Image (tube, rainbow, N blue to C red):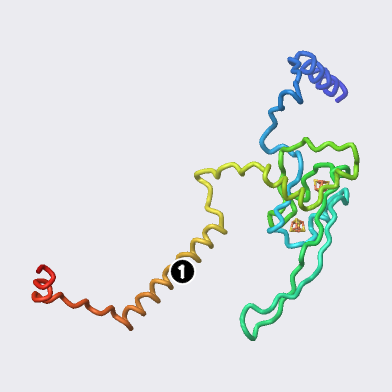
């Protein structure tokens, strides 16, 4: 047991000693980071429903969310009023964040994303609390998701959207045919020979 541990330790030391050292010339040369590096977190506010899941699951308690409720009038006459959460504040304190990614993993509405940006060091620690506007700015630096595997199944959201679009197109076509049957277009009168002769004169 002890022997195998020692052998593994020696192997790691040997690998480290024989690895070619590489000097990064940062900041003159930007490092080549893996595309999904955990640099900073971007907030896509439109997707956030203020469910508070990210703030509750964050092990460092460094996500601050404030909200209030608003009553939305019914969509149709006779319907019920609904209440919805409106975001007042969303901030992440990157001085406390340990970049575990739990908030991004647990968000059920795809409102949080990793950006590889890492150059946001500050001389004042308070500046490391990024408010919603700044978190929104980071969204522009989030890389596109990798393309889907060709053999992958279509996302169920896309299939549902396509089905709804097909249904709407069929309903529109049916309406158009019904209107056509009710009010068939009037046949345009053939110009008489006299008229056409008169036009020629
Ligand atoms: S990455 Fe981890 S520590 Fe940082 S805000 Fe998200 S859950 Fe909290
Ligand atoms: S988990 Fe997602 S939707 Fe819920 S509050 Fe956090 S960011 Fe918003």
Q: Which residue ends up furthest to the front in the rendered image? A: 201
Circle 1 residues within 10 Å: few <14, some 14–19, many ≥20: few
In the displayed structure image, the side of residue 46 where residue 60 appears, left or right = right
- Residue under circle 1? 167
Quarter in which the N terminus is drawn? top right
- The image quadrant of residue 69 is bottom right
Q: Viewer-proximal residue, 184 or 2?
A: 184
- Looking at the image, residue 86 lies above or below residue 188: above
Q: Viewer-proximal residue, 131 or 190?
A: 190
- The image quadrant of residue 126 is top right
Question: x, y percentage for residue 50?
Answer: 77, 62
Ligand 2 appears in which quadrant?
bottom right
In the displayed structure image, the side of residue 28 where residue 150 appears, left or right = left
Is the CB of mark 1 within 8 Å of ligand 2? no
In the displayed structure image, the side of residue 66 where residue 154 appears, left or right = left
Question: x, y percentage for residue 92?
Answer: 83, 49
- Looking at the image, residue 39 lies above or below residue 164: above
- Looking at the image, residue 178 lies above or below residue 51: below
SS for dot 1: helix
Which residue shows up at 72% across the image and 76% down it? Answer: 82
Which residue shows up at 71% across the image and 75% down it? Answer: 72
Which residue shows up at 78% across the image and 35% down it? Answer: 119
In the displayed structure image, the side of residue 182 where residue 15 appears, left or right = right
Quarter in which the C terminus is drawn? bottom left
Question: x, y percentage for residue 36?
Answer: 68, 38
Q: Viewer-proximal residue, 87 or 124?
A: 124
Q: Which residue ends up furthest to the bottom in the rendered image? A: 78
Question: x, y percentage for residue 6?
Answer: 85, 20
């Amino acid at each position: 047991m002890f022997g195998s541990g020692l052998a593994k330790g020696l192997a790691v030391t040997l690998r480290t000693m024989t690895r070619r050292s590489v000097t990064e010339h940062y900041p003159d040369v930007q490092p080549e980071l893996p595309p999904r590096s955990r640099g900073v977190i971007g907030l896509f506010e439109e997707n956030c429903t203020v469910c508070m899941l990210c703030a509750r699951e964050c092990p460092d308690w460094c996500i601050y969310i404030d909200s209030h409720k608003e009553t939305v009038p019914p969509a149709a006459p006779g319907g019920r009023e609904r209440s919805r959460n409106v975001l007042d504040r969303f901030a992440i304190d990157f001085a406390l964040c340990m970049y575990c990614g739990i908030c991004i993993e647990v968000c059920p509405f795809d409102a949080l994303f990793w950006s590889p940006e890492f150059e946001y060091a500050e001389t004042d620690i308070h500046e490391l609390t990024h408010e919603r506007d700044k978190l929104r700015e980071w969204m522009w630096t989030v890389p596109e998701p990798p393309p889907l595997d060709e053999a992958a199944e279509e996302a169920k959201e896309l299939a549902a959207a396509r089905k709804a679009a097909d249904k709407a197109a069929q309903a529109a076509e049916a309406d158009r045919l019904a209107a056509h049957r009710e009010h068939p277009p009037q046949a345009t009168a053939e110009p008489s020979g006299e008229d056409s002769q008169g036009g020629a004169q």
